[in-house]
Image: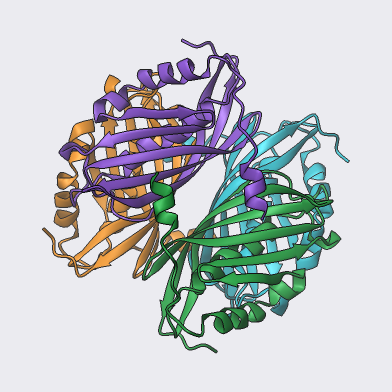
Chain colours: A green, B cyan, C purple, D orange
Amino acid sequence: MPHKALAAKPLEPRDPDWEAKVRASFARQKVMALIGAELTALAPGRCEIRLPFRDDLTQQNGFFHAGITSTIVDSAGGYAGFTLMPPNTDVLTVEFKLNLLAPADGELLIAEGQVLKPGKNLIIARGEVYAVKNGSVTHCATMQQTLMTMHGKEKT
Amino acid sequence: MPHKALAAKPLEPRDPDWEAKVRASFARQKVMALIGAELTALAPGRCEIRLPFRDDLTQQNGFFHAGITSTIVDSAGGYAGFTLMPPNTDVLTVEFKLNLLAPADGELLIAEGQVLKPGKNLIIARGEVYAVKNGSVTHCATMQQTLMTMHGKEKT
Amino acid sequence: MPHKALAAKPLEPRDPDWEAKVRASFARQKVMALIGAELTALAPGRCEIRLPFRDDLTQQNGFFHAGITSTIVDSAGGYAGFTLMPPNTDVLTVEFKLNLLAPADGELLIAEGQVLKPGKNLIIARGEVYAVKNGSVTHCATMQQTLMTMHGKEKT
Amino acid sequence: MPHKALAAKPLEPRDPDWEAKVRASFARQKVMALIGAELTALAPGRCEIRLPFRDDLTQQNGFFHAGITSTIVDSAGGYAGFTLMPPNTDVLTVEFKLNLLAPADGELLIAEGQVLKPGKNLIIARGEVYAVKNGSVTHCATMQQTLMTMHGKEKT
């Protein structure tokens, strides 16, 4: 069973300051404040962002807009990757692909980002988004993402 | 030169009411009002959305967040497809893939959606996003997208 | 922990003849014989295909070509989906996205397809590809895929 | 009209030996000989590969298998990118996403790769695949692809 063997490989941060660095960067993403998203969990190679429903985040049928789903899952994947990057770097999304599995219908969206392959220059991550409605959980989107380590950047 | 032969095929709306229908649906996407996006051009198989810069739409480096870029280009592609759908249907994004080509840095983002293949159930669209900075245009993102026609929906 | 709750949902075939149907379709994919791929495991919502190394399957550096990796993982995902489709249908790949995580270097490739969301018309699947080299396993590719159920098709 | 302005930007090779280098690499892709694919056009930022129909390249309905379509369009995009890379580098596909627009049904497939964004480390390319049947051309697949320049590689 190859998958389990691989999942066992621990993901090690290369920057002792990884947690503060990621939290500071998240705090600088002003769009997160605009939509009301919160960074709710962080570990090496993992990041969770939660977003409570608001009427002004919706598409034509009253569900969360796919772009809003993208916004939190792109950041969840990106910060999952950023936890593993060395000091004096920044994270850049090269591309992502999002499948929408079900309407993002509920009082809360939860986006989970997880690193699949922590390369030196490129990091491949995956993201899942869940909609919570009356306590019931629906898997509403799945993402595959390529991130790039930008070297030589000061943490400003 | 195969590409030109194909590009010549005209895209014909199947709903005489296509323009009003698309504009009404866009008006119901409350997230567009939140971020300040406007539907600036519409034609059968094409849609353009523009978004002026605001500080609260940014990521950690002060550029438009990739999720905001996604929000307008997903809608631009989706409404490009919706212009070609028959009456009593709705449009659903199945999936999209976005490559970020350059920082979304500027005073204005322009997202152009265009139908590539207008199938009966599935429509394949493409989206391009341009950043305008001091009048200079940079191609900052490109998207490939699959849309689904939802049949039997009332226009509510 | 939302993910586990969802993973618990069993995938039920809608065609009692699912296994024979999938094996017959695989046998008709002549490209599988050309490259030497074998269907090595099948269950509702899952499919595994194995491909031994051959020198004539390689790219410029002597590894399996990404297109060959695509060939087996597209079929593994497609047949994972086909196990869940009703009688008198066929499976069609709408699109897939493949990230190459490591060189496909080894004496054997193993592609695993798994259904993530078994919709009535669209099925979303995921694929993983592993390269086995001297008994050591490397996760070399990951795929996200959209499949369509083609209704009204005879099994020919 | 931003798109035209951008398309006007010429793509310049950074290696005077670009054509011989690409042709030599293509010749080393043994899978191309296996399936019968030919490199039929090459220019800075562009590459065309053609593949005549053979019965042993098919899926269950007798059309070209999507994996075979992927094989030629991945190489067409990859070599389009490689034409622009500096000396002593190699090209690596990071990821690609392929939408299948129509059955790959015909006596010939034509894959066209074209560079969209020639970055220093990453190149973004697009690929189109056309099926020719009795002289009639159908656009059967479209691809979006990320390539990486591998530095410090000898041309072996």
Residue drawn at x 64%, y 70% as measured from the top left: A41
Instruction: Tell me if residue B121 comes above or below residue A135 in the rendering.
Output: above
**Which image quarter is the N terminus of chain B in?**
top left
Residue at image coords 78%, 58%: A108
User: Residue at the right extreme?
Assistant: B156
Residue located farthest toward the left when viewing the structure as drawn: D156
| Drawn side of residue D27 relative to residue B131, left or right | left
Front residue of A41/D53: it is A41
Does the rendering let one see residue B107?
yes
Against A116, residue B104 (above or below) is below
Q: How many marks?
A: 0
Q: Is residue A59 visible?
A: no
The x and y percentages for residue D105 are 40, 24
Q: Of residues C30 and B100, which is closer to you in this image? A: C30
**Nearer the observer, A34 or D142:** A34
Q: Is residue B99 above or below residue C64?
A: below
Q: Nearer the viewer, residue C41 or C28?
A: C41
Question: Percent from the top left, x then y, of residue C135?
Answer: 25, 47
Q: Which quadrant would the C terminus of chain B be assigned to in this image?
A: top right
Q: Is residue B119 left or right of residue B57?
A: left
Judged left or right of residue D62, residue D21 is: left
Q: For residue D30, which quarter of the picture? A: top left
| Residue at (38% x, 39% y) in the render | C111
Across and down, in percent, residue B150 comes to 73, 34
**Among the 4 quarters of the image, the one containing residue D71:** top left
